[in-house]
Amino acid sequence: MKLELIKGDITTLAVDAIVNAANSSLLGGGGVDGAIHRKGGKAILEACMAIRARQGGCDTGQAVITTAGNLPAQYVIHTVGPVWNGGNKREEALLRDCYSNSLKLAVDNGLRTVAFPNISTGIYHFPKNRAATIAIEAVLGFEEREKLDKVIFVCFDEENYVLYRQHGNF
């Protein structure tokens, strides 16, 4: 499995799956979640509503998969990152679960290329430095990584890009 780091817009990537830093409602929101829903179109929202009807949303640390609608990716894997509450509510373990469960869903669906945004570092206020370390460690420690060709970390801003570059061998 190859690791790649880029600075850019995750909604423009033609990969098997992009990961959405979703909220538990799966109905779209701000940041990358809003951008994915806007650019992907109503097919993503309809798929998310079907998941909500079936299971009532998505819990923190878990992941679900939908069509990518109008996006160049084939699928969107929606994962719900933890809100930072000082680090005493299992936030680090839950963030690690976001990456592991997203990759597991990708492998289970035969997907080989996956792109991740910086989960929980926006309005959820997870410390960016720690989040970068957790993301890289979770991907490198994924047990079925040989079933993946490439994982891309997509940083929307320079700050996260620099942090990932410092923590990984890119």
Image (tube, grey):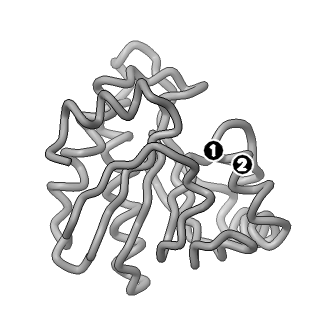
Tell me, for residue 168, which label it has, or none: none
Q: Provide residue 20's location: percent of width, then percent of height.
A: 57, 53
The residues bearing labels 2 and 1 have C-alpha atoms spaced at a distance of: 5 Å
Q: Provide residue 170's location: percent of width, then percent of height.
A: 20, 48
Which SS class for mark 2? helix
Residue type, numbered disc 1: Val
Q: Nearer the viewer, residue 83 or 118?
A: 118
Location of the N terminus by quadrant is: bottom left
Residue type, numbered disc 2: Ala
Tell me the residue that label 2 is attached to: 35
Which SS class for mark 1? helix
Q: Residue at x 60, y 61 (%)?
A: 12
Q: Provide residue 118's location: percent of width, then percent of height.
A: 45, 40
Badge 1: few (under 14), some or many (20 or more) residues near its Cα, within 10 Å?
Answer: many
Residue lying at the far bottom in this picture: please name it: 110
Residue 62 in the figure: left or right of residue 58: left
Q: Nearer the viewer, residue 155 or 107?
A: 155
Q: Residue at x 52, y 38 (%)?
A: 156
Q: Residue at x 69, y 58 (%)?
A: 56
Residue lying at the far top in this picture: please name it: 86
Tell me the residue that label 1 is attached to: 32
Q: Residue at x 33, y 49 (%)?
A: 5
Number of marks in the image? Answer: 2
Q: Provide residue 110's location: percent of width, then percent of height.
A: 38, 86
Q: Quadrant of residue 88?
A: top left
Q: Quadrant of residue 54?
A: bottom right
From this view, report whether residue 25 is shown above or below residue 111: above
From this view, report whether residue 72 is shown above or below residue 20: below
Badge 2: few (under 14), some or many (20 or more) residues near its Cα, within 10 Å?
Answer: some
- Callout 2–callout 1 Cβ contact below 8 Å: yes
